[in-house]
């Protein structure tokens, strides 16, 4: 009996020693195929990462020349002892693969250059998806406090809005997120933690690892080379902007020269990188060059907002057309700057008024063919519904379905938006704000034209109170997103004797009231004006407004304070108001 017990104890000691040697040598290590350069396997104390999945280790044994691991599907993994920094690793009946330990924070350079070009283009087919399986491993408590959701977003080419997708992580930080894509798309991962920017291609499955303990961030999958290269060598493109204080003063061609210089500097840095790392893939190089091109195009296209009467020289717009519009990388969803660039460029040429035939003629004149024609028509319709907060009429919807938009995805976006505003109309029709004291008449500033004097007149009744001025528009997505949080804002700031004054920019009376009703932006200390365009513009010129929403804080004596009063940073605004008590 004693001999049996001693035998069992000895066996347990041996197994414990084997397990400890495994932990000492393999736990928290990641291995790449020495020949291809791909990350193919990783080991933790209790798991194996392989084939885009985290597997439980059910058994560990040590032989003379190898560790033998069994994972939960019964597959055996043989990890041979290290020789000259390399280990041969075999999974199941597969041939052993010579692997090297990944010692850097991201995957080292691939051993051979990949000359493939191009990115998957599915024709903007509705119904495609991407799957990201991942693990935020050994996440510290402060990171868990940011939430248990793992999220990604990509910019909708039709709506100019982010499409957000989230999934709950398990207790170890693991997740599987499948989300729709319209084509190869630039995405943002886990914005408040890892904040990775990359792209994904339709139909692909990716494994994403961010190991807080070892500091490693890696991609695993059949087609992840560029994603790993972007982790190792992120792009450094810079959007040039005209400072608001210089609006109307900077010459367009001088600004173009500035963007030329910025792009040249970025491309020189890329060439230096290629010289130092000659095996960087051609797709990585193409992707980065395309991003720098699109960043310059977007920067140049938005400059119109800072020019007198929003007009740019023909020479300037010819350059935008030839160098960026005609040469844009495909698919058009590859960079999230493209929707902004497209809309800035095409809307520059749009007449203030025009039917669909007029718009079609314009699009033809600048070479806007399918699929961008459908995308832009869908964008216009969505923008129209956003601006009016009203669905499109049945005749227009029939024209859209039968003639204007053939792309299923673009048509689906329009219909979804139309359904939203159909339901919204039915809801807000029940709310009557016609007699609300929050809606103010512009009659009290009739015949006034000086922006400073108009603003002082509007704020005169509120002397002795702090006034939070919000300049917004029914056409402005970020403005309405901010308004949707108004009740939270009012509750947080209720102790600061604050008056809320809202001035609407270029908004129809119907849309103005619809938005106010939708978000219930009314109350005893809440006041709205929808001034004539000339008067609203005069106030905005006085305040130097060139982007919306625009917030200003007005002191108790009517002085406009030079402070950051943006309620989207609610705690920051509360702290500011506390100091002004």
Image (cartoon, rainbow, N blue to C red):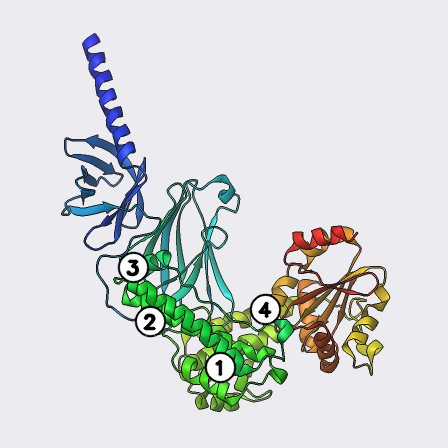
Q: Are marks 3 and 4 in contact (CB under 8 Å)?
A: no
- The residue that appears at 59% across and 78% down in the rendered structure is 305
State the separation of the CA atoms marked 3 and 1: 41 Å
Vertical comparison of 397 with 8: above or below: below
Confirm whether residue 338 shows in the render.
no
The local secondary structure at tag 3 comes to helix
Kindly indicate the quadrant of the structure image that contains residue 22.
top left
Please identify, in this view, whether the residue under mark 1 or under mark 4 is nearer the observer: 4
Between discs 3 and 4, the one toward the N terminus: 3
Residue designated by label 1: 400
- Residue 69 shown left or right of residue 288 in the figure: left
Between discs 3 and 1, the one toward the N terminus: 3
User: What percent of the width, then of the height, locates residue 261?
Assistant: 45, 74
Please identify, in this view, whether the residue under mark 1 or under mark 2 is nearer the observer: 2
- The residue that appears at 37% across and 69% down in the rendered structure is 268
Q: Residues within 10 Å of mark 2 (few under 14, many from 20)?
A: some
Residue designated by label 4: 477
Residue designated by label 3: 225
Residue 122's disc number:
2
Kindly indicate the quadrant of the structure image that contains residue 321.
bottom left
Please identify, in this view, whether the residue under mark 4 or under mark 2 is nearer the observer: 4
Vertical comparison of 315 with 286: above or below: below
Please identify, in this view, whether the residue under mark 3 or under mark 4 is nearer the observer: 3
User: What percent of the width, then of the height, locates residue 419?
Assistant: 54, 70
């Amino acid at each position: 009996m004693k001999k049996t017990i001693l035998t069992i104890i000895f066996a347990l000691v041996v197994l414990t020693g084997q397990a400890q040697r495994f932990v000492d040598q393999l736990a928290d290590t990641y291995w790449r195929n020495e020949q291809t350069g791909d990350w193919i396997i990783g080991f933790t104390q209790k798991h194996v990462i392989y084939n885009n999945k985290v597997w439980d280790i059910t058994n560990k044994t040590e032989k003379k020349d190898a560790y033998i691991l069994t994972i939960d599907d019964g597959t055996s993994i043989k990890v041979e002892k290290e020789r000259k920094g390399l280990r041969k690793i075999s999974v199941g009946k597969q041939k052993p693969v010579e692997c090297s330990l990944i010692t850097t924070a991201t995957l080292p350079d691939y051993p051979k250059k990949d000359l493939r070009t191009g990115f998957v283009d599915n024709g903007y087919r509705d119904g495609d998806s991407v799957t990201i399986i991942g693990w935020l491993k050994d996440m510290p408590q402060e990171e868990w406090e940011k939430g248990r959701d793992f999220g990604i977003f990509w910019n909708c080419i039709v709506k100019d809005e982010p499409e957000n997708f989230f999934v709950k992580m398990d207790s170890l930080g693991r997740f599987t997120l499948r989300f729709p894509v319209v084509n190869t798309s630039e995405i943002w991962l886990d914005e408040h933690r890892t904040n990775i920017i990359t792209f994904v291609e339709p139909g692909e499955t990716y494994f994403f690892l961010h190991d807080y303990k070892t500091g490693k961030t890696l991609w695993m999958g059949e087609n992840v080379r560029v994603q790993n290269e972007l982790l190792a060598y992120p792009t450094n493109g810079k959007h040039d902007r005209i400072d608001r204080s210089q609006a109307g003063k900077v010459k367009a061609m001088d600004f173009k020269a500035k963007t030329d210089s910025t792009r040249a500097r970025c491309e020189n840095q890329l060439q230096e990188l290629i010289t130092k790392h000659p095996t960087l893939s051609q797709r990585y190089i193409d992707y980065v060059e395309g991003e720098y091109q699109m960043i310059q195009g977007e920067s140049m296209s938005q400059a119109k907002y800072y020019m007198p009467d929003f007009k740019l020289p023909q020479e300037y717009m010819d350059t935008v057309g030839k160098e960026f519009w005609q040469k844009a990388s495909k698919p058009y969803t590859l960079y999230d700057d493209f929707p902004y660039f497209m809309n800035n460029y095409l809307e520059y040429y749009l007449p203030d008024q025009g039917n669909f035939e007029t718009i079609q003629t314009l699009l033809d004149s600048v070479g806007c063919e399918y699929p961008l024609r459908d995308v832009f028509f869908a964008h216009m319709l969505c923008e129209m519904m956003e601006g009016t907060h009203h669905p499109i009429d049945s005749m227009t919807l029939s024209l859209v379905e039968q003639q204007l938009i053939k792309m299923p995805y673009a048509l689906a976006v329009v219909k979804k938006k139309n359904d939203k505003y159909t339901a919204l109309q039915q809801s807000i029709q029940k709310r009557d704000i016609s007699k609300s004291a929050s809606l103010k008449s512009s009659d009290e500033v009739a015949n006034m034209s000086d922006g400073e004097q108009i603003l002082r007149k509007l704020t005169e009744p509120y002397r002795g109170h702090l006034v939070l001025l919000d300049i917004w528009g029914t056409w402005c997505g970020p403005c309405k997103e901010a308004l949707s949080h108004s009740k939270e804002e009012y509750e947080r700031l209720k102790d600061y004797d604050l008056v809320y004054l809202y001035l609407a920019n270029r908004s129809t009376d119907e849309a103005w009231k619809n938005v106010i009703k939708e978000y219930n932006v009314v109350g005893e200390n809440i006041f709205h004006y929808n001034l004539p365009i000339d008067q609203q513009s005069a106030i905005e010129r006085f305040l130097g407004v060139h982007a919306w929403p625009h917030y200003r804080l007005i002191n108790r004596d009517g002085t406009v304070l030079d402070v950051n009063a943006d309620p989207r940073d609610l705690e920051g605004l509360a702290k500011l108001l506390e100091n002004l008590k």
